């Protein structure tokens, strides 16, 4: 994908924070519109259990994604300049971990800055694994 169009979410798929589709990775925010703060971490392997235990995230979801080409960061509407955030050295199976905090503070509101924070970590994997919902902020979209 060239990032010009956002991936379509699967209405029958999981909707807690993260959904990986054949077209891309979708992160569900709490606010209806507005700025959110995103950090993308490209890793060689899964984050350590010590790093995860020390994190102060309210919600974490991890899922497999088949990444065939570049991934772009863009909202689902209203922004025409997607930002390239990851291009796999070798296309194929990857693990995506999304961690977030602040999603419930301004749920479904339109704000200039929502205060929501997201960390997206991506690393290649050899074998598929089950979706993990590691922490829960109670928000299912």
Image: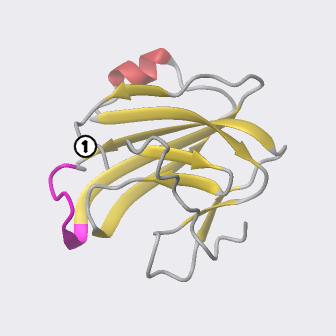
* Percent coordinates x, y for residue 137 in the rendering: 24, 36
In this image, 10 relative to 78: left or right? right
Mark 1 falls on what kind of element?
Answer: loop
Q: Residue furthest left?
A: 105
> Where 11 falls versus 43 (above or below)?
below
Is 119 included in the stretch rendered in magenta?
Answer: no
Residue 41 percent location from the top left of the image: 56, 44
Q: Position of residue 102 (x, y in %)?
A: 22, 48
**Residue occupying image coordinates x 57% and y 80%:** 81
Q: Residue at x 39, y 25 (%)?
A: 134
What is the number of callouts on the image? Answer: 1
**Residue 109's quadrant in the figure?**
bottom left
Magenta portion: prevailing SS class: loop
Q: Nearer the viewer, residue 27 or 52?
A: 27
Is residue 55 or residue 100 the one in the foreground?
Answer: 100
Q: Residue furthest top?
A: 49
Bounds of the magenta segment:
104-113
Residue at the spot of label 1? 139
Residue 37 horizontal/vertical position (percent): 36, 58
Query: In which quadrant will I find the N terminus?
Result: bottom right
Q: Is residue 90 left or right of residue 45?
A: right
Q: Is residue 1 above or below residue 38?
A: below
**Is the residue 24 above or below the residue 41 in the image?**
below
What residue is shown at x 51% (from left), y 46% (from top)? Answer: 19
Q: Residues within 10 Å of mark 1 (few under 14, many from 20)?
A: some
Residue 57, picture quadrant: top left
């Amino acid at each position: 994908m060239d990032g010009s169009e956002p991936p379509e979410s699967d209405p029958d798929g999981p909707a807690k924070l993260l959904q990986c589709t054949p077209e891309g990775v979708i992160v569900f925010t709490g606010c209806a519109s507005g700025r959110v703060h995103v950090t993308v971490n490209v890793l060689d392997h899964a984050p350590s259990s010590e790093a995860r235990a020390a994190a102060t995230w309210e919600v974490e979801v991890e899922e497999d994604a088949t990444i065939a080409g570049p991934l772009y960061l863009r909202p689902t509407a209203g922004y025409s300049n997607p930002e390239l955030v990851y291009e796999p050295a070798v296309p194929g199976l990857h693990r995506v971990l999304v961690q977030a905090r602040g999603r419930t503070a301004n749920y479904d509101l339109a704000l200039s800055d929502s205060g929501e924070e997201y960390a997206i970590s991506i690393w290649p994997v050899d074998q598929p694994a089950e979706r993990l919902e590691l922490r829960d902020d109670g928000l299912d979209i």
